[in-house]
Amino acid sequence: MQTPTLRPKETTTEPHRLNPVTSLSTSRYNRSSYIQVCPRIISKGPASCASSPSASRWQRFIHPEGQPYFVLYNEEFPVVTEANLEEAETEAQILDSLSVVTKELRCHDIEVPPRCELFLELDEDRSGLFWLEDLGTELLDIPAAMSPSHLDTALEKVYWVHVEYFPMHHEPHDQGLSQIVDDLYNIISHGQADRLTSRTSTFPYTADTCKRFLRILSRKSGQSVDGYTLCYAARLASAIANQRFITFYGQQSAQLDRLQEMYPGDVLEHRWLSTVANLMLWGIPGHYNTLLEDLYVNEQVYADQWTYFMSLCLADWTTSMSWTFPVLIASILLANVRGGTISTAIPTIVSCGISIASASCLHLRHSPLAESSASFGARYLRQAKSTSVGFLPSAVVFSLPKATYMWAVGFLFAQFLFIASRSVSKLVALVAASFLAVLLLFILWVISPEEPGVVSLFRSLSTSYVTHLYSGAAREDESMA
């Protein structure tokens, strides 16, 4: 297994020391250096390979993404680095660091296991020793683990990230690395079946994505693995290892269902606010709050569930806005008929205005999130969740377009009854209003769940207008009631 990263530090007053990190902590994808280009002279004659001070000791490889790195095959273990060894000073620093590691290994009488690599990266800000002494996981940016075997899963992810970053120098016939393609094929096949038969599977990829991965892996099944294949296979293996770590794979308390809570739930305060919000907004905040809680169980976010939820929200807000305009127009027209006044249309107009404004703002803010990643969704939900009231603020805001539209419909109905009462007798108007109210209650009673009560009516009304997150993803074994 890979030895983690060592970052050398060199000063005039201290001996050369090393800092502990892992491949996950490198600046590979966060470098801010700028390039400089200028016209060049093409030499006459055949093209020749430029030599460098390190050419005799190091082998240069190019990662499939384009990043060059260097490998030194010494007697004890290979050394890999992304440092620019075409500079003599940089090579000297790397070799100096290597001598420090070799000295510490001999001092502590540590025998390096087979297939172990040393990764060196230059850095001038940190110092320390890595895995030559006891070290806490928090210093390596490795999450807390519940057992040694759980920690091994986290280190497996670090290993595969290292292989992904440095895949080109491995032997094509290395049995240990060649086996990963067949292993991945079996793992992803099971994940595909799990996704097809369970709507709360913990596997990170959808069935369609698994199908594409299996098609790619099948081309290399049973064959020697080159650097390009090893690169994407290691990336998949690190993702699988990460999923196994966060779901406690192999532990007695493994997470077998995506909605299974593994940590004690937060004790929410001010629960009366949720009751008031649901009564004022037709129970819709409670529905949105449930969906948000389902998305963020154990602070885990699945990309397909997150994007599907955002797509549903965007569609709901768009529909609410499109339905609000006819209500607004009808209210204004009623205000201009005989017996109507503009004051009777004010509640409807205000409700429509809130619905249109909130839907427009929500759509503008969240439309880019429909294609965002799971990590972005996790950051969004982490910021949106309050320690005292949970997702209630977000649920209330998400409910405004639909809830205020429903209030607008109610106010329009009241406006119509008011104008009608001025044209007919009060008895006829009262009878008509009572009949419509009884009809509405009958409809709510028909579509409501079995338990009686006002809360169930509000819940049934809200769920009639808001699509559930899993409405189109029924399990295969749920085709029979």
Image (spheres, rainbow, N blue to C red):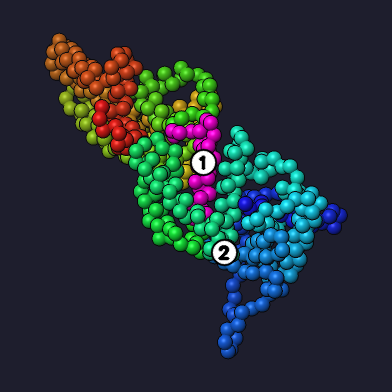
Is residue 114 shown above or below 468?
Answer: below
Tell me which label, 2 or 1, sits earlier in the chain: 2
Element at label 1: helix
Residue pushed farthest right? 13
Q: Nearer the viewer, residue 141 or 320?
A: 141
Q: Would you identify the image quadrant in which residue 422 lies?
A: top left
Position of residue 263 measured from the top left corner of the image (x, y, whole percent): 54, 28
Dot 2 amino acid type: Glu
Q: Nearer the viewer, residue 385 or 131?
A: 131
Looking at the image, residue 265 sits to the left or right of residue 4; the answer is left
Q: Residue at x 75, y 45 (%)?
A: 133
Nearest-to-viewer mark from 2 and 1: 2
> What residue sits right under mark 1 in the picture?
244
User: What quarter of the picture does the C terminus occupy?
Assistant: top left
Q: Residue at x 42, y 18 (%)?
A: 275
Looking at the image, residue 182 sits to the left or right of residue 74; the answer is left
Element at label 2: loop
The reply to whether residue 457 is in sight is: yes
Q: Is residue 256 magenta?
A: yes
Q: Residue at x 22, y 19 (%)?
A: 446
Q: Nearer the viewer, residue 369 or 143?
A: 143
The reply to whether residue 383 is in sight is: no
Dot 1 amino acid type: Arg
Is residue 426 shown above or below 87?
Answer: above
Residue pushed farthest bottom? 45
> What residue sits right under mark 2 in the picture?
171
Position of residue 467 measured from the top left corner of the image (x, y, whole percent): 31, 33
Position of residue 290 measured from the top left corner of the image (x, y, whole percent): 41, 28
Q: Which residues are magenta?
A: 233-258
Q: Residues within 10 Å of mark 1 (few under 14, many from 20)?
A: many
Q: Is residue 291 magenta?
A: no
Q: Residue at x 52, y 54 (%)?
A: 234
